[in-house]
Image (cartoon, grey):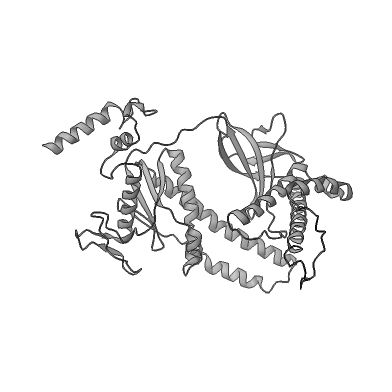
Amino acid sequence: MLTLTYEYKANPTKEQINLIEHTLDVCRKVWNFALRERKDWINSRSGPVNACSLVSEYIIPADEPYPNYNAQAKSLTLAKKQYPELKTVNAQVLQQVLRKLETAFIDMKRKGMGFPRFKNRYRMRSYVYPQLGEGQILKGNQIKLPQIGWMEYVKSREIPDGFTVKQVRVVRKASGYFLMLTLECNVDVPDIVPAGHPVGLDLGLDKFVATSDGALIEHPRFLQTLHRKLKLLQRRLKNKQKGSRNRHKLNKKIARLHQRISDTRKDWQFKLTHKLCDDIGMIFVEDIDFRVWAKGMFCKHTLDAGFGQFVSILQRVCWKRGVYFAKVNKDYTSQVCPQCDAHTGKKELKDRIHSCPECGYTTHRDVAAAQVIRNRGASAVGGSPDLRHLAWINALGRSVDQIACGDGLTGTGNSLVKSQRSRKKGGEA
């Protein structure tokens, strides 16, 4: 099963905007009530049995079960009789809010994430329709949503043939409303075979990306470009009265500026990943948890670079372009010579040149680290960085003729075998 998500700009009418805002408001109330219920149950059991808590809390009976998703979904159905406002929103939308809260508590224990937070009018920004019903859903540049009806959207790209729309998420951003369509197609996609020219990438704050081929890409610093304007707007926000209309207008202006920075960064990263995937067969990057970088001295610059987003975009683009993508061990990539594998010692941040005392190899520090990453990736898939297509395929136990889509294409089939034979003859001569 292949799943894709396409994002489109929505053009709702005033009545539809009111319905969307009303749905977000009810979803926010359900989220806060369910979170309060879980938090009270946890706090009532946090203290010792033979002592009272220093903080006033609700007394919940000892035999009261934990309010998980099933219990809260049942309570939501009963609450609709007492609160008619809940009936004005699609039932499955409210159930998805409770499912999201359940996932947040599971991630808190399993992934070590923080405690879920209560949401105000700005924090609840999206809701999802898990099912769209029977019949025609799409018609031209319109989509039919439950309770909203036919809504126009900017059809920036066509939906691929064979894909069906399974669910729709309505998202409110600073620049308007967006639709995120989840598309599914019943097809099995084979894994990408490691073949072609390998390239290692080293990410850093001095140079955004350094490739093993010697390319150095500068850091664009999107936040720093608009930081002064953002700082002036936030300084004005301090003097606005909370809850006033002027504060709300200024909040929207700040949010639009933040979205401008985010959209510019994301657009640049997509263009860069497509450029990196040209004329290569494999890409290797370091396996780094960038959340650790975001807590250090250069946290602001790390968040401005968006390394985690770049790696995830690169992985998606490699999959779409048919380029093999893998992560390698990150340890000591700047302390090893890519030519002789000798340990050159720890370098300081000011040292930007790699010079090996054993073999005399000299290059840029980040380029040397990228070449080490390339060598580690090559060893992981069973080849060496000097070979091209044939060694990678033989290492996986496949012949050249067994490659899918390899009939008559450049670099495959008999032409590849002949080129390898000519290289061997040339080396023997």
The residue most toward the right is: 82
Q: Is residue 222 visible?
A: no
Q: Nearer the viewer, residue 237 or 292?
A: 292
User: Is residue 201 placed above or below 403 in the rendered structure?
Assistant: below
Task: Tell me which residue sits at (46%, 43%) in the image.
Answer: 317
| Residue 206 place in picture, x, y as percent | 38, 63
| Residue 168 place in picture, x, y as percent | 66, 41
User: Is residue 272 placed above or below 405 in the rendered structure?
Assistant: below
Q: Is residue 5 visible?
A: yes
| Residue 195 place in picture, x, y as percent | 34, 38
Q: Nearer the viewer, residue 187 or 231?
A: 187
Q: Is residue 380 left or right of residue 295?
A: left
The residue most toward the front is: 50
| Residue 205 place in picture, x, y as percent | 41, 63
Q: Is residue 42 left or right of residue 226?
A: right
Q: Nearer the viewer, residue 124 or 34?
A: 34
User: Is residue 157 placed above or below 301 in the rendered structure?
Assistant: above
Q: Quadrant of the N terminus?
A: top right
Task: Tell me which residue sits at (51%, 55%) in the image.
Answer: 264
